Amino acid sequence: MSSPDIHPDLRLAAKVFPQQVGLPRNLSRLRALIRVSGLLPVPGVRTMAVNDDVNVRVHVPKNLIEPSPALLWIHGGGYVMGAARQDDSFCHKVMRETGFPVVSVDYRLAPEYPYPAPLEDCYAALRWLSVQGWIDPTRIAIGGASAGGGLTASLAFLARDRGEVAPASQLLVYPMIDDRTTARTDIDQTNLRLWSTESNRFGWDSYLDGADRDIAVPGRRTDLAGLAPAWLGIGTADLFHDEDLAYACRLQAAGVPCELEVVPGAFHGFDRLVPWAGVSKDFVAKACRNLQDALV
């Protein structure tokens, strides 16, 4: 994987953001920062309990027509950090653009809770959402960014295999989807931001911790037929670029519709870090249009 030039809309921001967040040595500090940022209340967002382990944050438009389509959203954080609250702004934006409720799940984190606990938490949230009277269970999309995108892909497999809830689509935003990227030595990290091979190795090792990787890792799965249609967005300056393109091609080869959006020169998390940039707005708008097409 070569390192392309940073997109013109993102070059100034790229000078500010670090190449890596420094896991594992900074994990406790990063978690603390996320907790502090979540102390302020956010108007119009309800927190609801799914079970003793799982809560969801519910973003509902004012003029909801029931039963409604919905998006179940899964936050990122390398499987080891993050919270549903961190994506409140993004979820509100998607709700506003699509007119659909967005329900964001707080799942348990590795290494304290490795696979399959985080995935089972997301599945519990999906089942919970499917039986809410104000939701049409046949029009639920699942989506997530980074590790949340990896959990989304795993959730698509789990939902298909259990046959209880059938997601209408999956939204894979620069998903962390294949642990084998951690073993690569040919990656030019010059233009990577926030997520490095060191962080990636720690995240995967924490999450998998003795699991059968051929089952737990979406990029290793060979049985892709029958999964929900997908939209996958990735930047060329993202550590996950190659693994994501490979996964999109394998979905298509298995007969799963997959719309692929590749953003030249975009680094990991660019649409959250630089949401005002034209390239970020366009990226989110395309994801929202795909949701609308899939759920209306």
Image (spheres, grey):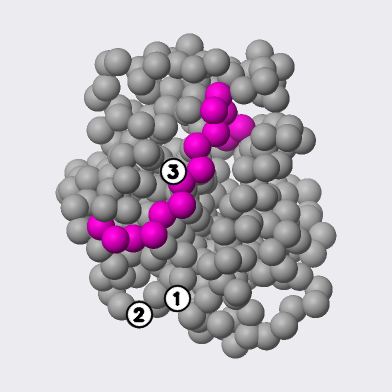
What residue is shown at x 48% (from left), y 80% (from top)? 138
Q: Determine whether 106 is above or below 63 in the image.
A: above
Look at mark 3 in the image and give the residue it sits on: 175
Looking at the rendered structure, the kind of residue marked 2 is: Glu
Q: What element carries label 2?
A: loop
Question: Which disc is residue 164 wearing?
Answer: 2
Q: Determine whether 3 is above or below 60 in the image.
A: above
Instruction: Give the quarter of the figure containing the C terminus.
Output: bottom right
Can you tell which quarter of the image residue 35 is in? top right
Can you tell which quarter of the image residue 67 is in? bottom right
The magenta region covers 254-270
Residue at mark 1 to residue at mark 3: CA–CA distance: 22 Å
Rendered location of residue 258, percent (x, y): 41, 54
Q: Is residue 35 visible?
A: no
Depth check: 108 or 95 in front? 95
Dot 1 alpha-carbon crowd within 10 angstroms: few under 14, some 14 to 19, many 20 or more: some
Looking at the rendered structure, the kind of residue marked 1 is: Arg
